[in-house]
């Protein structure tokens, strides 16, 4: 319907008064929100018992809460390792579980931090993990025969043993004492079992290595080791049938010397080096070099 005087009627409307009246009608009530409390009691972290090198898996802590979360948990195992915990609930109690393997026996301070993801409130508690020894040492049968000269130092292997309880334990975790039979005892040095592997890191732009990193083990290919009749040099050959990698490394002492443990600096290409210089050759996958210098360490 058309009203010819509608503009005049609108013009006489008291908008300021209407606004004032409308503003008096809007009086929102303010609600005070009570902060949520994450925990009704302090969380309880369980004292743990585990064996070194063995996987521990199970409950680490329990807690109760005034709400259903969600919760995020972090477990500090006390040996420098921190992992996420898994939260489960039952009977009004929440359980934090985790998995970890300790590398060595001892006592570790374990702590758990629990975070309520809704309001970021936190709670924490700690306990002790007692890690027992897994080593079972078995001396190898047979004895070493040592030959020396009075007044001179005698160096060499004096015994062998196996750790059947923790075969991958680091040799640095063992100490030894040698009784030489003449009233003298000294500390021995324990070295771990030999590992067969070929690791190479080639710099970008290097022709022989192609700028790649290589890690070869008996699981990826076959190794063959040969040495000269006078023990002056040793050659490691590696080959594999699947991917076709083939590498060879030769290490040599100066002429007239046996290759023994030690650092050999200023090495040149083994086949063409001066007599008083160590030798080194590296080639593989169809690539080699006419000139080569470097150093190597025999342990």
Image (cartoon, helix red, strand yellow):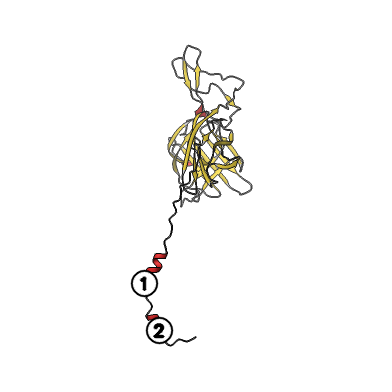
Question: Observer-nearest residue: 293 or 298?
Answer: 298
Percent x, y for residue 208?
A: 50, 49
Quadrant in which residue 99 is drawn: top right
- First-in-chain label (2 vs 1): 2
Residue with the most extreme bottom position: 4
Q: Is mark 2 on a helix, strand or loop?
A: helix
Q: Residue at x 47, y 38 (%)?
A: 124
Question: Observer-nearest residue: 21 or 49?
Answer: 21
Q: How far apart are marks 2 and 1 (CA)?
A: 19 Å
Q: Residue 17 carries which label?
A: 1
Percent x, y for residue 176?
A: 50, 21
Placement of 231 over or under 268, stated as above or below: above
Examine the rendering and report whether any part of residue 6 can be seen. yes
Placement of 242 over or under 43, stated as above or below: below
Left or right, residue 177 beside residue 224: left
Question: Observer-nearest residue: 80 or 250?
Answer: 80
Examine the rendering and report whether any part of residue 299 can be seen. no
Left or right, residue 126 beside residue 56: left
Q: Residues within 10 Å of mark 1 (few under 14, many from 20)?
A: few
Q: Which mark is residue 7?
A: 2
Percent x, y for residue 2?
A: 47, 87
């Amino acid at each position: 319907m058309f009203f010819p005087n509608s503009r005049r009627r609108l013009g006489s409307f008291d908008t300021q008064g209407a606004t004032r009246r409308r503003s008096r009608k809007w009086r929102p009530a303010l609600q005070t929100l009570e902060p949520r409390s994450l925990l009704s009691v302090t969380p309880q972290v369980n004292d743990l018992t585990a064996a070194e090198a063995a996987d521990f898996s199970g409950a680490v802590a329990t807690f109760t809460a005034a709400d259903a979360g969600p919760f995020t948990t972090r477990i500090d195992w006390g040996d420098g390792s921190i992992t996420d915990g898994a939260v489960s609930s039952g009977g009004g109690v929440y359980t934090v579980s985790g998995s970890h393997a300790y590398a060595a026996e001892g006592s570790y301070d374990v702590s758990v931090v629990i975070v309520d993801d809704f309001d970021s409130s936190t709670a924490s508690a700690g306990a002790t993990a007692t890690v027992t020894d897994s080593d079972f040492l078995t001396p190898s049968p047979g004895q070493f025969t040592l030959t020396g000269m009075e007044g001179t130092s005698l160096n060499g292997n004096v015994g062998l043993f196996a750790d059947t309880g923790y075969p991958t334990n680091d040799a640095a975790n063992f100490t030894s004492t040698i009784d030489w039979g003449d009233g003298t005892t000294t500390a021995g040095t324990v070295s771990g079992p030999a590992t067969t592997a070929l690791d190479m890191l080639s710099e970008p732009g290097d022709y022989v290595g192609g700028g790649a990193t290589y890690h070869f083990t008996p699981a990826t290919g076959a190794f063959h080791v040969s040495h000269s009749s006078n023990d002056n040099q040793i050659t490691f050959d590696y080959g594999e049938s699947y991917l076709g990698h083939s590498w060879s490394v030769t290490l040599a002492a100066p002429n007239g010397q046996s290759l023994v443990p030690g650092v050999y600096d200023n090495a040149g290409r083994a086949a063409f080096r001066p007599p008083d210089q160590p030798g080194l050759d590296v080639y593989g996958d169809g690539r080699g070099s006419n000139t080569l210098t470097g150093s190597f360490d025999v342990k």
